[in-house]
Amino acid sequence: MAKSEATNYDSSKAAKSEATNYDSASAPAPKRKRGKGDTSITNEKVELALEEMDAEEQRPRIRQPAAKEIVCPMFIVTPAMANRAKEHADNLIVEKKKKSAQYLSKRDEKLKAIGQENCAEYYEQKIAEVKRIAGEVE
């Protein structure tokens, strides 16, 4: 009888392996793409959003006053250290201004090389023209 139990075990094992055969399984159904939200934006909503942005830009920003003295119990800032820190900060600002000036001069040279010396004025004229046309369309 042990022999018949062994054959039953082998046949059930074969059935399980056939069930896990992935070759005969079909591919899963593709997932449905979902929208990115409500796409019905009206002109009124756009105008309200633009008005809010303009109101935020016109509102003056309140600047928090810097602390006069930073107190740290484990570190005491001496006047010499404060002077060195201020000099270092001033040097960084000067370097930044120099790099900005160098970038602008290189940019102007490149623009002159391609024949666009007054590109800022050109773009200002184009912006004014676009605004004029937009006013006529509305």
Image (cartoon, rainbow, N blue to C red):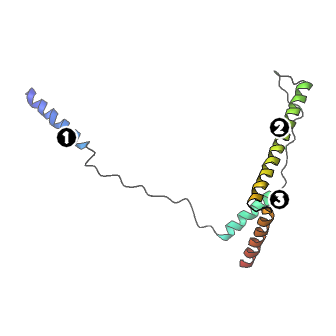
Residue that numbered label 1 is attached to: 15
Residue occupying image coordinates x 9% and y 31%: 4
Q: Which mark is residue 92?
A: 2
Residue 120 lies, with reference to residue 101, above or below; the image says: below
Is tag 2's residue or tag 3's residue first in the polypeptide sequence?
Answer: 3
Res 2 → quadrant = top left
Specify whether 17 is left or right of 37: left
Q: Nearer the viewer, mark 1 or mark 2?
A: 2
Amino acid residing under circle 2: Leu
Q: Position of residue 112 (x, y in %)?
A: 78, 59
Q: Residues within 10 Å of mark 3 (few under 14, many from 20)?
A: few
- Type of residue at label 3? Gln
Residue at the farthest top position: 74
Quarter of the image with the N terminus is top left
- What is the residue that sits farthest to the bottom in this orientation? 136
Q: Earlier in the sequence, mark 1 or mark 3?
A: 1
**SS at circle 3:** helix
- Residue 125, horizontal then vertical, whole percent: 79, 69
Nearer to me, 56 or 91:
91
Q: Secondary structure at mark 1?
A: helix
Q: Residues within 10 Å of mark 2 (few under 14, many from 20)?
A: few
Q: Amino acid at mark 1?
A: Ala
Percent x, y for residue 66?
Answer: 86, 38
Q: Which residue is mark 3?
A: 58
Q: Picture quarter containing residue 48? A: bottom right
| Residue drawn where x is 88% and y is 29% of the image | 84
Residue 50: x and y in percent read 73, 64
The numbered mark, 1 or 2, whose residue comes first in the sequence reads 1
Secondary element at tag 2:
helix
